[in-house]
Amino acid sequence: MNAKHGTLHKRDQQAKPEPLAQTHEVFNQARALENYNAYDNDTALREAVRRHGAGWAEDKLSAHGAKTGSAEVIEWGFLANEHKPQFFSHDRQGYRVDFVKYHEAYHRLMTLGLESGIHSAPWSDPKPGAHVARAAQSYLQGQVEAGHGCPLTMTFASVPSIKLTPSLAKEWLPKILNNAYDPRNVPHTEKQALTIGMGMTEKQGGSDVRANTTRAYPIAAEGPGEAYELVGHKWFTSAPMCDAFLVLAQTDSGLSCFLVPRWRADGSKNPIQVQRLKNKMGNVSNASSEIELRGALGWMVGDEGRGVPAIIEMVAMTRFDCMVGSTSGQRQAVAQAVNHAMGRAAFGKTLIDQPLMRNVLADLQLEVEGSLAITMRMGEALDNTTLDPDNEHEKLLLRLGLPAGKYWICKRTPFHAYEAMECLGGNGVTEDFIMARLYREAPINAIWEGSGNVQALDMLRALAKTPAVLDVWFAELAKTVGSDPRLDKAVTSLKREFADMEEAEYRARDIVDRLSLTMQASQLVSAGNSAVADAFIASRLGEHGDRNYGTLPRGLDLDTILRRANPWEGN
């Protein structure tokens, strides 16, 4: 408009404001992966559940898969991570409270997990497939959000340790196994449902818990179930709002285990003082803390001086859940990558139809297939030993399978998450998408509950203490002998490794790699899907050595593998 004459210039007459404002048409973007059934559309999971004796749980798992795949529950995961836990040492009047405040979304996730019995089902109702069904449910829940899985796992894992002392078990287990969530900051005596945490590591010791300096002093009588006061510190105590913690401390007879509540029975606060919350790169919805124990009341669990054997009952279960959790992260990463590739086109084709992208996605799915196969076999072994504690084969399989499986799956997950994230391009690195969170979560399980070296050395310790574990491992592998010459060759090569144990500690990682890969391959052969087993063996047991994802050899049935990866398709 000409201000002086009130007329339009020619260029102004040609301009059309409406089209100029339309600069943002959204196209060539994949739909959000939400409002799908994470169980019904996961063929590998459904097959594993049936194969390992938990087919009876499918209706419950399908219902849980519908919840965890819903937009509402997925949003809880985002909110719980966006709003980090906040620590308050004192209340407004100045009283020491050691209170950690969580976002409501975190509490909703905890409610979903606890009401579903993820912390309790195999203990409350032991039967064939109970651990497998519970692992499947945890696997579904973990795809939404990993952080709240920590207190769920620790509560679940505390049960075998607490059972070592009948007087404590009688008082505590009914509330621990209650399928309810009570986040109130009140004494455990006023609650009907409790959660349990764990405090092992100290700043000077880390994984070397025998270097712990925390001391326990008997109040009166000594021994299992008796009261002590603990003085010392813990460098990592996750989920500090749990109602009690299994803690290691020194007595005159050596390192012992104690159940330490946050409140005393008289309603006074037990002197467990939180110093600060850890500022972690991942697992941010779950508070992890440094604590000081200033004469904190606790009761001895197990025998005096036998703290490591007592708490190792708990650690075995948490290591199994590390396998479940990392496999869960792998599955969600593949689901996101495939969902994106189905809805995105480049260079004239949908990404899912591009040969190189198909190679990458199928390779990522094969990792999930192997991780899930060994995890669920260990779940079946847990069922077998729960129902029959004298089942030596299954006990020894677990003794080697838990460190080997935990090591391999958790170690593979960070690179797996990165490769899946790359499939989404720039979207993958933004916090608006779940991939960035999956990537930040990926290293956590590899470090917690014993890092890679700890697992590899634990494998050697098992071999030295109980040589029969190796016979059991090869007996399990023998179930598929003759099915594939490449697998047979790998097993024979593995046997040769154990014939020469010189510098075994130096070679421990290589040995545990082979243990894990051959067991994964054998389990996939047993599962009966030839396309999956053939591709896994061809890519993992060949002569490639170290490899990147997307380097599958030619001639494999990628169609079958990619259908299994598709989160929208239940085969």
Image: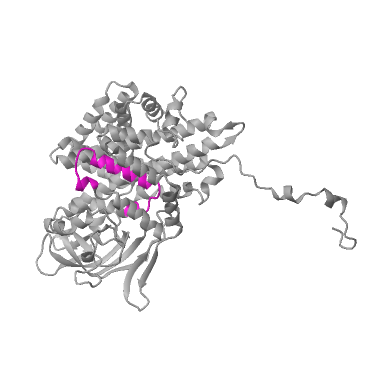
Tell me where residue 50 appears, x and y as whole percent.
28, 33
Residue at the left extreme of this rendering? 221
- At 27% from the left and 23% from the top, the residue drawn is 481
Is any atom of residue 384 visible in this view?
yes
- Residue 327 falls inside the magenta stretch: no
Is any atom of residue 505 visible in this view?
no
| Placement of 529 over or under 213, stated as above or below | above
- At 23% from the left and 66% from the top, the residue drawn is 190
- Residue 130 falls inside the magenta stretch: yes
Tell me where residue 137 appears, x and y as whole percent.
32, 44
The N terminus: image quadrant: bottom right
Q: Quadrant of residue 253?
A: bottom left
Tell me where residue 17 appears, x and y as whole percent.
75, 51
* Colour mapping used in the image: one colour
Q: Main secondary structure of the magenta part?
A: helix
Residue span colored magenta: 121-150
Query: Residue 205 or 471: which is nearer the viewer?
Result: 471
The C terminus: image quadrant: top left
91 with respect to 347 (left or right): left
| Placement of 264 over or under 152, stated as above or below | below
Tell me where residue 413 appears, x and y as whole percent.
40, 42
Q: Quadrant of residue 277?
A: bottom left
- At 44% from the left and 37% from the top, the residue drawn is 567
